[in-house]
Amino acid sequence: MGAKKPRIVIVGAGMAGITAANRLYVASEGRFEVVVVEGGTRIGGRIHTCEFGGDRVEMGATWIHGVGGSPVYEIATRVQALSSEQPWECMDGILEVSRAVAEDGSEVDPAVLERVSSLFNSLMDFAQGKAKAVGDGAPSGSGLREVAVEALEVCKGESGGMRNLSIGSFLRKGLEIYWERDGCGKKNGWRNLDEEAVFAMHENTQRVYTSADDLSTLDFSAESEYVMCSGREITIAKGYSSIIEPLASVLPPGTIRLGREVVKIDWCPAEDDSENGHADSLPVTLHFRDGATISADHVVVTVSLGVLKARGGRDSGLFVPPLPSFKTDAISRLGFGVVNKLFLQLPTTDDRTKFPVLQLAFHRTDSGFKNEDVPWWMRRTASLAPIHRSSDVLLSWFAGKEALHLETLADEEIIEGVSGTVHSMLPIPPSGSVPRNGKLNPDKLPNGPVKFKKVLRSKWGSDPLFLGSYSYVAVGSSVDDVDALAESLPRATETPRVRHPLQLLFAGEATHRTHYSTTHGAYFSGIREADRLLQHYS
């Protein structure tokens, strides 16, 4: 009789879990018994492609964030997923961003839009430590890099160093210094209100990029350690699900078990586990919601950081015994936010050019101007645009409190709120045909009133299998916490003679030091943990 195969159970059938299973199965040549347990009814996790209004749309992961060095791009190329006859969420129009509109119905002066956008981008380039030189344009002959340098020094003094410095405070200080150098001071004129609105629009976009509800919670130092893949950012014509499906397809039937929600993971951190009663002398036992169990030599935990925050703490009961403090502290300190997508379908017409790509510039609520037709949950979304040039489907992104609130609204409330916002800000004639701050007719679009047909939105915040969207490094944490989250248990340094090493391994986007928050980060983490086990048995 041959030796019993080590059993490896992977919790979660998202990108990290499926990648780990694929690697273990292909590289081990049948040496392991690999099982993937998934609490939901589908594979993919935060990858979820579906159809809406005749178009292919993404409820979760959407972009390949840089084609250079991205395994997602490599897979998409290999399986020929980058072209499709069916229309998809390619966002081709968003790359030709045309107009920023203010809530009073006026178009933001293109010069203001360009100037403030350059300032914001220069500040972010500086924070991210990008090697390229930032612009030397206005204000008043002073380089934008000098604005960033001064903002950093002032913020370091105010926060007592780098440890508690946030991206939000750095950006706001940069705007203040820009105003002072430009001679605007803090006047309450229209020029400053528009500049403030454009700057806030970019902040709202950054909230979506990072999932932070407030940029004041986003750590400054971590920005320079985050690594971007090079090259252009693209969407996947055949859908993000076309990336994960071929990874799963090579696994033997029965490897992936859906509808298996794990409620408790028993493991054995001590050297002597003879009294723990684990079946078949295996050190880890997983308990499912229906009362069933499965035992394993090793468990790869790929659940979201949101689930770990809710259920992985010392008193939550997911892990028995609880995770050690170095790991629960890291889980507590790291940030995990909510980002949701809202799709709205317009009635189909013969005119396929009816809706423009819009950047939405909302004035501060204390500025003296507030349009009551715009609901509070719309005020921090930055754009509304067709998902491709001829689409009847529009897309808007929401983060933080607004994203969570969106999940609670009825479809009719969403349609009313977005319609009120659009009627307040459109139509806009071609740039230059309306005097600065001239009021526009809010009653008609170029092709008639806005009447949305139906809506579709994601609900990542309230989904118990995710409880959010993706991770970020919060003020008070660091990328060292990401490494701590990724560390396997039991720790070999604490128990050098441990009887069963590598009982718990951790993967997922939140465990990757330089690519957290991305699908390629999740992929890399799955490969990392699979290779850790392969090396252990080599």
Image: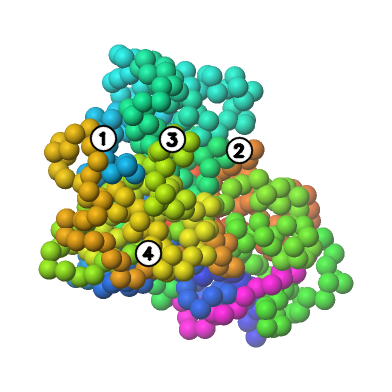
Determine whether label 1 and label 3 are within 8 Å by CB: no
Q: Position of residue 323 (x, y in %)?
A: 74, 57
Residue at 42% x, 49% y is 372
Q: Position of residue 399 (x, y in %)?
A: 47, 52
Residue 415, label in figure:
4
Distance between the alpha carbons at the discs numbered 2 and 1:
39 Å
Residue type at mark 2: give it: Val
- Which quadrant holds residue 347? bottom left
Q: What residue is shown with label 1?
A: 437
**SS at badge 4:** helix
Residue 467 counted in the magenta span: no
Which span is picked out in magenta?
250-269
Instruction: Give the side of residue 225 with respect to residue 355, left or right.
Output: right
Residue lying furthest right: 275
**SS at badge 3:** loop
Q: Give the foreground label among 3 and 2.
A: 3
Q: Position of residue 451 (x, y in %)?
A: 28, 66
Q: Is residue 190 above or below residue 16?
A: above
Q: What residue is shown with label 2?
A: 475
